[in-house]
Image (cartoon, rainbow, N blue to C red):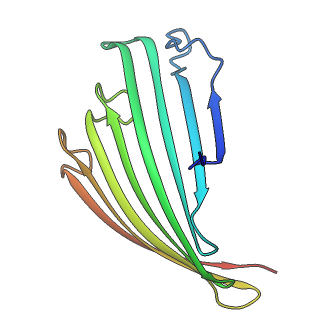
């Protein structure tokens, strides 16, 4: 059989996963798994699963959360790359974000090495929360960004 995802990594935190009331500090326990697969010379895919929890959280008790992220990357030339990302993040009590609910997001971006010293990166992103209104009173948010990196 062939291993579909051959570049796998995993991580976990060693914290106690307990809210530290004496310092008003969140101390979640986190588990993470990342797998990557090169589909061809131009295409690759990465999947990530994250989960965590915190106990003794004020007004909540135990606050679990989880996330799944998928990336699809295309590099047709040395000076051009495109990435699409799909994310699901479930924050049942709103402990991690301040607003409870299932967050979904999709983004697409380019990285164009315009010259040896200039990198141009436009990105478009759409976020949504199915249960609350975390985006200035709205359920959804559309963001367009553009950055130019100048190296010298």
Q: Is residue 107 visible?
A: yes
Q: Quadrant of the N terminus?
A: top right
Q: Quadrant of the C terminus?
A: bottom right
Residue at x 47% of width, y 25% of height: 52
Q: Is residue 96 visible?
A: no
- Between 151 and 79, the residue placed more toward the observer is 79
In percent of width and height, residue 141 lies at 27, 59
Q: Residue furthest right?
A: 152
- Foreground residue, 145 or 47? 47
Residue that appears at 58% across and 43% down: 34
In this picture, residue 75 sits left or right of residue 134: right
Does 36 sit above or below residue 40? above
Q: Along the horizontal axis of the image, is 149 left or right of 66? A: right
Residue at 75% over, 85% down: 117
Where residue 53 appears, as percent x and y from the top left, is: 45, 20
Q: Residue 104: x and y, percent?
A: 30, 49
Q: Quadrant of residue 145?
A: bottom left
The residue positioned farthest toward the bottom in the image shown = 115
Give percent across and percent down for residue 119.
Answer: 65, 81
User: Which quarter of the figure has residue 132?
Assistant: top left
Height in image: 86 above or below 148?
A: above
**Which residue is located at x 31 percent, y 30 percent?**
94
Numbered marks: total = 0
């Amino acid at each position: 059989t062939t291993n579909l995802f051959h570049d796998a990594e995993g991580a976990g935190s060693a914290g106690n996963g307990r809210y530290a009331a004496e310092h008003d500090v969140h101390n979640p326990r986190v588990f993470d798994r990342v797998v990557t697969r090169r589909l061809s010379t131009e295409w690759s895919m990465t999947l990530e699963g994250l989960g965590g929890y915190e106990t003794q959280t004020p007004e909540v008790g135990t606050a679990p959360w989880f996330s799944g992220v998928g990336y699809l990357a295309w590099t047709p030339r040395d000076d051009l790359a495109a990435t699409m990302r799909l994310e699901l993040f479930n924050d049942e009590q709103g402990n991690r974000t301040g607003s409870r609910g299932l967050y979904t997001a999709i983004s697409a971006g380019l990285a164009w090495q315009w010259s040896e010293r200039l990198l141009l990166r436009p990105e478009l992103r759409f976020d949504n929360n199915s249960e609350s209104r975390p985006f200035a009173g709205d359920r959804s948010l559309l963001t367009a960004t553009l950055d130019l990196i100048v190296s010298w």
